[in-house]
């Protein structure tokens, strides 16, 4: 039996989020399945002939699968906020820019098509940034680190100003003031965590494929990292695939490539977050043409030279 205080704390955790009871139920069923499979081990009838390969490995494979599921659930529980504080969820539409003021005095400016959840506890301030770009102005609090959790790893600070941009397979953090520390997410269940790196002003941390890399940048690049706040698009050597992801996020338009190989072309420029402006940039800098299909869908293709008659 759980002590009374533990039961009250556990019930509070179940109540703050509809997903928590379902997660606990899955974990409980997993442990029950493991226990029942273990009891079955001694009751499998003997047979003079070797069982078929699929039966021979069925029980160990099932136990291993349940054990892995239990490990994953345990890791999920271990990351849950210790004080069971409810998370506040925020999402923006394409081309919308929204500033969120947090109770600790910090603020988040979220780009178009962005998504973030904020959880404040006595030990930590955590933002789960799922997609988009965000400018963080973090109030100094030495007792509660401010952690930005992303698909590629975590960024940790005490109080500073920085920009985080999520793109396909990469998270880029640009320091505007103070310093930030970044550590990449392990790429597999049994892989080790990468060594953290710390960035100062005019430096960026790139988290990708389980690695954390420190990159110096020029002061001129910093305003371009904030272009989305003014509904602008800045490209500084990104691939066309990455540029399309940005413009789609900012405008809500869908861009496709007639030839997938075009996606590796490099893009440079600074234009309005507008589909027509992006098409013009693609025409002038990369020699691409555009075909419109219905509402907000464009196919880009390589311009062909017409022979004179």
Image: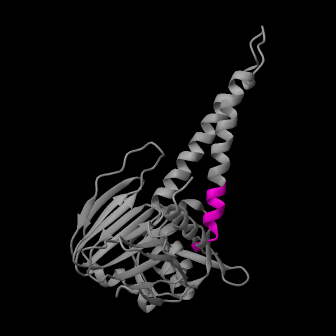
Q: How many numbered markers are drawn?
A: 0
Query: Residue at (60%, 62%) from the top-left corner?
Result: 259
166 relative to 181 in the view: left or right: right
Task: Please state which of residues 240 and 12 is positioned toward the viewer in this rendering.
Answer: 12
42 relative to 13 in the view: left or right: right
Residue 258 visible in the snapshot: no
- The image quarter containing residue 64 is top right
Q: Considering only vertical position in the picture, is 98 above or below 74?
A: below
- Range shown magenta: 16-25
Q: Considering only vertical position in the picture, is 71 above or below 54?
A: below
Residue 212 visible in the snapshot: yes
Task: Please state which of residues 56 and 228 is positioned toward the viewer in this rendering.
Answer: 56
Relative image position of residue 89 (x, y in whole percent): 54, 79
Relative image position of residue 261 (x, y in whole percent): 54, 59
197 relative to 190 in the view: left or right: left
301 relative to 142 in the view: left or right: right
């Amino acid at each position: 039996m759980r002590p009374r205080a533990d039961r009250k704390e556990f019930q509070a955790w179940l109540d703050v989020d509809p997903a928590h009871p379902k997660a606990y139920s899955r974990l409980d069923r997993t442990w029950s399945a493991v226990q029942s499979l273990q009891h079955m081990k001694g009751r499998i009838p003997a047979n003079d002939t070797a069982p078929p390969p699929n039966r021979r490995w069925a029980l160990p494979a099932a136990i291993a699968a349940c054990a892995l599921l239990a490990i994953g659930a345990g890791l999920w529980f271990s990351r849950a906020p210790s004080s069971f504080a409810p998370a506040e969820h925020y999402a923006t539409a394409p081309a919308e820019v929204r500033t969120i003021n947090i109770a600790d005095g910090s603020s988040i400016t979220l780009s178009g098509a962005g998504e973030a959840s904020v959880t404040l506890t006595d030990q930590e301030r955590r933002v789960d940034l799922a997609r988009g770009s965000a400018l963080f102005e973090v109030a100094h609090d030495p007792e509660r680190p401010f952690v930005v959790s992303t698909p590629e790893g975590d960024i940790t600070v005490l109080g500073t100003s920085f920009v985080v941009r999520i793109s396909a397979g990469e998270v880029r953090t640009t320091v505007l003031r103070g310093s930030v520390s970044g550590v990449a997410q392990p790429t597999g269940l049994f892989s080790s965590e990468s060594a953290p790196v710390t960035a100062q002003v005019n430096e960026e941390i790139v988290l990708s494929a389980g690695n954390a890399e420190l990159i110096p940048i020029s002061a001129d690049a910093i305003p371009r990292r904030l272009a989305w706040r003014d509904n602008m698009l800045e490209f500084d050597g990104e691939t066309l695939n990455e540029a399309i992801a940005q413009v789609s996020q900012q405008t809500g338009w869908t861009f496709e490539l007639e030839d997938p190989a075009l996606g590796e072309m490099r893009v440079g420029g600074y234009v309005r977050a507008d589909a027509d402006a992006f098409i013009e940039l693609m025409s002038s800098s990369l020699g691409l043409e555009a075909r419109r299909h219905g509402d907000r869908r464009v196919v880009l293709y390589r311009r062909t030279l017409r022979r004179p008659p």
